[in-house]
Image (spheres, helix red, strand yellow):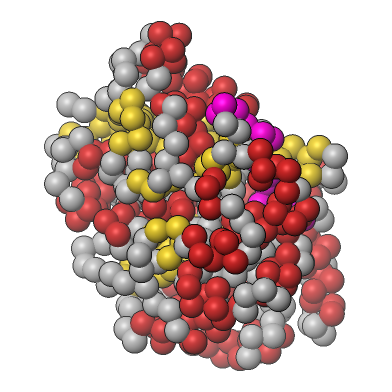
Amino acid sequence: MKRVLAFDFGASSGRAMLATLENGKIDLQEIHRFSNDPVPVGGVLYWDVLRLWFEVRQSITKALAQGGFDSIGIDTWGVDFGLLDKDGQLLENPVHYRDTRTEGIPEKVFEILPKEEIYRRTGTQFMRFNTLYQLYYLAQEKPWLLEQADTMLPMPDLFAYLLTGEKRSEFTITSTSNLMDPHKKEWDHALCEELGIPTRIFPPMIRPGEQYGTLRPDLCEELGCEPVPVIAVATHDTASAVVSAPASDKDFVYISCGTWSLFGTENEVPVINEASAAANFTNEGGYGGTTRFLKNIIGLWLIQESRRQWIREGQEVTFAMLEKEAMAEAPFRSFINVDDPAFEGPGNLPRRVREYCEKTGQPVPKNRGQVMRCIYESLAMKYRFTFLQLQELTGKTYRSIHVVGGGIKDTLLCRMAADACNARVLAGPAEATATGNAAVQFISLGELSDLWEARAAVARSTDLKVYEPVDPASWESHYERYLKVTGQA
């Protein structure tokens, strides 16, 4: 029986899981969990990558104590990267995507290449922190960094390099950069050259299921482990989560629900046209060369950051308490556009919710429960808005939505999503990214034949919770007001 070690780095925490495949089921055992805390230094928000590397090594040690493993796979968030010099050393800690350095940068890029042209060539959703805008910022403001750089490695590829010494960029994580041709599935060197971004820093690409290499000899000697392969899973965390969606047919909708809500479907080819550009849908890589056609929506970040603010104010609140308080309040009082830039950064998010409601002439939430009710209903309404867009853009009708990831523990949001979208919601698995990560490793090792056998194994391994629409008419009756006050009409 094969055992694999899956590293899943999220925007706020990381975990290492040992996974086994037995009797057609994937079993996950968490062996190490750790926080992933950004560090502000000199006005810049960095990822603490050296600490994360320490946690990787700790995880390997703990996994060896549990009996060892046959391979390693890593998935992380998208868009961010590390720069290596010619000796393979980091030039600086990777900068966090929530750092403000890219504010106003997309507009400067559009003066060189029109927004429509960039979308036509990359099919990528416009977000100011995409790799394209981060690198353009460096090219304009810190050119010496790019001059010294020999290689740019996206975050999962950076950890794979630290493990193996091999420099590669995996397909699904590359697809989040806004720098990839989605048809050729390669770096768009011409686009980079037009923006003054040096193409020599881009490493060769690797596909999900291929191997970066084996663990470095010095690491094996130090930690006392065998030179097992490090497998390129679907290294973008959403791509791994989609692998784990326990769907039985090709046409399905998913929400990878966590700090972000990634709402989309899986296509054979990209959808790039004026309508998809206007809707700001993105085309990102999936396992087997598929395209994840989706929309990035700010998700549980709104709830997480609100709770952090209340804790900073000395209030002892749990997520369960906040959900209960939201349920006790009257419905449909106020709405926010969850993707408004006002809600992107850390800080006093409840105050920003109140300011938004006051600015748009709505009842201002007065207590925690009203703030939470506003956030929950606004998220569910955004799901409805995106669900309708997705069906129009694909020309397909979907009757159910697979919700995967830690957000399935939020039963109120799942129930609201079913009502708002008037669709059945199937929730599970909770550890979707780690499950998808492990599944690709098992395919690579020959334990599973293909993606669909992997999804069948996930379905057998998951206790799916089903939410049927109960009162979709109420959501329908308030939808036009939601569109008007959020500026989406």
Name above or below for residue 111 compared with residue 451.
Answer: below
Q: Magenta stretch: dominant SS? A: loop
Question: 127 above or below 445?
Answer: below
Percent position (x, y) of residue 103?
A: 76, 62
Q: For this view, does 366 lie left or right of residue 126?
A: right
Q: Image quadrant of residue 214?
A: top left
Kindly indicate the quadrant of the structure image that contains residue 354: bottom right
Q: What are the residue bounds of the magenta stretch?
A: 87-100
Number of residue marks = 0
* Residue that appears at 67% across and 64% down: 128
Residue 251 is at least partly visible in this image: yes
- Quadrant of the drawing holding the C terminus: bottom right
Coordinates of residue 161 in the picture (x, y in percent) = 46, 31
Which residue is found at the position 40% from the left and 46% from the top?
204
Q: Is residue 221 above or below residue 25?
A: above
Viewed as shown, does residue 411 lie left or right of 374?
left
Q: Is residue 443 left or right of residue 313?
A: left
**Residue 268 locus on image (x, y percent):** 28, 69
